[in-house]
Amino acid sequence: MQTHYERIGGEEVVRKLVDRFYDLMDQQQNFQDIRELHAKSLKASREKLFMFLSGWLGGPQLYVEKYGHPRLRQRHLPFAISELERDQWMTCMIQAMQDLGLEEDLSEELKRAFWKTADFMRNKEG
């Protein structure tokens, strides 16, 4: 059985997904709230998300090898994340997946998995 990493197309497509995600976040006004949680330059965020997603999708554990356990919730605690930010993050990721033309079954599986993770990051009411 193939991993999500293999099904998505490996390193090249994971990189394209991350780049499209951050391009959308940086360019579209409707993602302003989530964009404001990031540094002015998205270079480090792009690299960390790429490394994290590589392992999360079943590919090389790049993030773990460099930084250790992701501890996602702990690493996101300094940022106020409510339903608004969660929903903007999800909308941005869904749009990035659509723009890459991911296979429908894979896209739906990833949406469900992303939703669980994004919802777990909430640390603020509203």
Image (cartoon, rainbow, N blue to C red):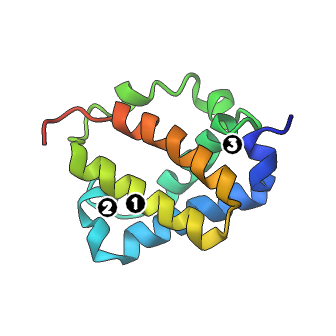
Residue located 44% across and 71% down the image = 24
Q: Nearer the viewer, residue 82 or 47?
A: 82
Whether residues under marks 2 and 3 lie with C-beta atoms below 8 angstroms apart, the answer is: no
The vertical placement of 108 against 73, above or below, is below
Question: Which residue carries the number 2 mark?
Answer: 35
Q: Which residue is mark 3?
A: 54
- Mark toward the viewer: 1 or 3: 1
Q: Residue furthest front?
A: 105
Q: Residue 54, located in which quarter of the rendered image?
A: top right
Residue 17 x/y as whole percent: 61, 61
User: Residue shown at 44%/30% (left/top)?
Assistant: 72
Q: Quadrant of the N terminus?
A: top right
- Mark toward the start of the polypeptide (2 vs 1): 2
Circle nearer the N terminus (2, 3): 2
Q: Position of residue 56 (x, y in %)?
A: 63, 35
Query: How many residues crowd around disc 1 within 10 Å: few (fewer than 14), some, or many (20 or more)?
Result: some
Q: Nearer the viewer, residue 41 or 112?
A: 112
Amino acid on which the number 1 mark rests in the picture = Thr
